[in-house]
Image (spheres, rainbow, N blue to C red):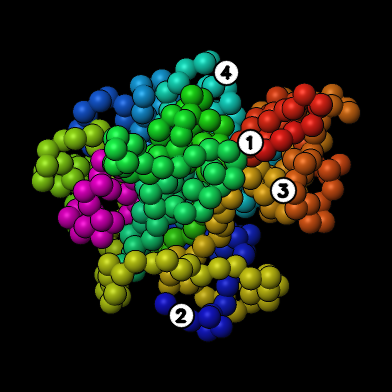
Amino acid sequence: MLSKGEHQTVPLSVLLKRELANEKIERPELFHGQASQSKKGEDFTFVKTECQRVLGDGVATYSVFGLFDGHNGSAAAIYAKENLLQNVLSAIPPDLSRDEWVAALPRALVAGFVKTDKDFQERAKTSGTTVTFVIIEGWVVTVASVGDSRCILESAEGGIYYLSADHRLECNEEERERITACGGEVGRLNAGGGTEIGPLRCWPGGLCLSRSIGDMDVGEYIVPVPYVKQVKLTSGGGRLVIASDGVWDALSAESAVECSRGMPSEAAASQIVKEAVQPKGIRDDTTCIVIDIHLPEKENPPAPPPKKSGKGVFKSMFRKKTSESSSNIQKDFCEPDVVEELFEEGSALLSDRLDAKYPVCNMFKLFICAVCQKEIKPGQGVSIHAGASNTRSSRPWDGPFLCTSCQEKKEAMEGRRPTGDGGYSSD
C-alpha cells in the first residue's frame, strides 16, 4: 500500500462521474449465497437484489443484504428485517443524482436504525437484535452495523478489510466509557463470594453488547446508532462475508476467506458455517452470507492479473479523501489499485451523525424530523444541537431538527433524564 503523500485521492463524486462519463468501468455482477445452522432460531437474513429507483430519465439499481442476530427472542430481529430498509429509504430526499444518493446513505442509515429501534420499543417488547446491513450501488459498498455480527471484504488484490465494528463491551473500551458516563454499569456476572465470571456486561439487563436494536429492558444507553463505513472497490471486485457471532467466535476473518476461496458464493457460505460449527458442534445460531462482486463475464475475457503479495494481511488503513480540488484530480487520476475509503463514522451521538457537515446539502427539510420523517409544526422542532456540551460553532437554533418524541429518544440515549424542575440531569 502506498505511504502517505505518495498517492492522489479522489472524492466520491469524481469516482462516480468518471464511471458514467467514460464507461471504462462496467457495473458489476453480484452473486450471493447463504447458509445457516440454527440452535435458537433467532438469526434472520434479508436479501433484495436489483432494487430500482428513478434517476432522471432512467432507472438506477442497487442491492441490499442484512443479517439480524436476535437475542431474548426473535421479535426485534423480525421487526428490523421487515422495516429497516423502508425506514432508511424514507430518510433519503427524492430526486437525488447517483452520487448524491450514495453520499446520503450514511446519514439515512443512522436515521433508519434509530427510527426502527424507536418504533419497535413502542411495542413494549424486550427482545433485541444485532444488525449488519449492506447496500451495494455499483462498486460502492456501504455497511452499517450494531452489535457483534461482522462484515469483511476480501478485495481482488488480496487484502482483507473490516467493514463493521464489534460492539462487544469486552473488546471496546470507548463504548464501556460511554455507557458508564450515561449512567449504566459495566461488569461481569457475580457468582458469589467475590467471584466474577463470563464476559463484561451492561447492568441492569446483563447485555454484553453496547449497541443493538430493541433491548428496552436494558437501558437507553444501549443505542441503535450504527457504525458506518463506505468504500469503493476497484474494477477487480471482491468478496463480502457477512456472518453472525456464531461464525466469528470460531473463525478469524483470514480463516473464513481461506477455507472458502475459489468456491462459488453458495458453497462458500456453507463451507464457512461448516468450519465454524465443526470443532465444538453448534452452540449458537450460525449464519453466513457471501457476496461476490465482479465485472460481467465476457465471451473471451482477458486473463486476470496475478494477486499481489501480502494476501491475508489485514487492512486497518484505507486511502482517505482529501480536500484537494476535484477538477485537478480528474485530469490525471488513474484507477487506484486498492480499496478506496469514502466514509467512516462510529460516534454514538446523533448531533455528530446528523450534523450539517455531512456531504449532502438540504439533506433534511426544515420542518421534517431528521429521524422519523414526520412533519414538525413551525416552532415545535428541537435542534439536534440543543443541550450539547460542546456546541463548537453550532447553535441550538441550527438544524437539522427533531420532533419532540425523537428529541426525548436522543436525550435518553445520551443519559439525560427529565427532572422535576423542567431541566435535565445525568444519572
Label 1 sits on what residue type?
Asp
- Residue carrying label 4: 122
- Residue carrying label 2: 2
In terms of sequence position, does the residue under pointer 4 or pointer 1 come before the other? 4
Left or right: residue 319 versus residue 161 is right
Q: Quadrant of residue 198?
A: top left
Pick the quarter of the image with the C terminus: top right
Q: Nearer the viewer, residue 56 or 47?
A: 47
Q: Quadrant of residue 118?
A: top right
Looking at the image, is mark 2 or mark 4 nearer the viewer? 4
Label 2 sits on what residue type?
Leu
Asked whether the viewer can see residue 92, the reply is no
Q: Residue at x 50, y 65 (%)?
A: 340
- Residue carrying label 3: 355
Disc 1 to disc 2: CB gap under 8 Å: no
SS for dot 2: loop
Q: Nearer the viewer, residue 140 or 414?
A: 414
Q: Residue at x 42, y 77 (%)?
A: 1
Left or right: residue 419 versus residue 170 is right
Label 3 sits on what residue type?
Asp
Query: How far from the left and from the top, in percent, is residue 209?
Result: 42, 40
Cα distance between the residues tagged 1 and 2 = 47 Å
Q: Nearer the viewer, residue 11 or 400?
A: 400
Label 4 sits on what residue type?
Glu
